[in-house]
Image: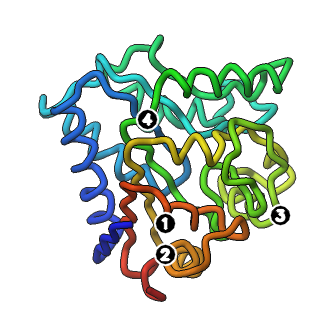
Amino acid sequence: MKIIITENYDQLSKKASEFIIELLKSKPKCVLGLATGTTPIGLYQNLIDAYNKGEVSFKDVTSANLDEYVGLQKDHDQSYAYFMRKNLFNHVDIKSENLNIPNGSAKDLQLECERYSNFLKDNIQDIQVLGIGSNGHIGFNEPGTPFDSTTHVVDLTESTIKDNSRLFSCIDEVPKKAITMGIGEIMKSKMVIILASGANKAQAVYNTVKGEVNTTCPASVLQNHPNCILIADKDAAKLI
């Protein structure tokens, strides 16, 4: 695992964008694995800026998002489909037919998991962007998730619900389940970029980089990935 420590969040976002911009230039018809949450917003803004300057195009890109809440419609303002439109897709030339996000409002969630897993088999991510939860989760793969897992429905832990409650009017509105790409599918990505910002992520970053590789910290499996880059600001990296 390569580790890049930046002074602040803005530098983290800029550095992460450089890897994706390089990919877009060298392989316009690529598969981008994308994450939601507050951490990658700066990255997406940098990508939008690069697009507006004519440096890159997304017209041949296929997206593969990590996860989606169960029970939220795509137009709900806290759904991850809405998040991606607001923070990236609506501002670049990516084609709507190339957007891929698990459908958390599907009638048959197991069938939806199988559909998405089959999509990923045929569309290996050239770069998978990840954030990291305070408990070490990646995607919504909570502690205890098997490392060979494929797309599945997960019951969110209390800590994850609490972390995400800042985005809702109250904690009771936070969905209790989500569909997430499995750890096994994340690990098949050709390159993984994991982003960490803020002191509240410091212990998770330490466990990811220096802890034992086990399911108590799902992100620790990335120690075994052949091409993983951790980009952390100095607050998130303070324990390493």
Q: Which residue is mark 3?
A: 158
- Residue 209's disc is 2
Secondary element under disc 3, as helix, strand or loop, is helix
Q: Amino acid at mark 1?
A: Gln
Q: CA distance from mark 3 to mark 4?
A: 30 Å
Between the C-alphas of marks 3 and 1, the distance is 26 Å
Type of amino acid under label 3: Glu
At horizontal 37% and vertical 80% (from top left) the residue drawn is 234
Q: Is residue 76 above or below residue 5?
A: above
Q: Amino acid at mark 4?
A: Gln
Measured Cα–Cα span from mark 4 to mark 2? 22 Å
Q: Are marks 3 and 4 in contact (CB under 8 Å)?
A: no
- Is disc 2 placed on a helix, strand or loop? helix
| Residue 52 in view here | no
Residues at marks 3 and 2, CA–CA distance in whole angstroms: 24 Å
Residue under label 4 = 125
In terms of image quadrants, where is residue 79? top right
Residue that carries the numbered disc 1 in the rendered image = 223
Q: Residue at x 55, y 27 (%)?
A: 120
Q: How many marks?
A: 4
Left or right of 10 in this view: 154: right
Identify which amino acid the numbered label 2 is placed on: Val
Judged from the image, the secondary structure of the residue bearing numbered disc 1 is helix
User: Which quadrant of the structure image shows residue 186?
Assistant: top right
Pick the residue in front: 41 or 65: 65
Sequence-first disc among 3 and 2 = 3
In the figure, is residue 10 to the left or right of 188? left
Circles 2, 1 touching at the beta carbon (< 8 Å)? yes
Left/right of residue 191 with respect to residue 196 in the rendered view: left
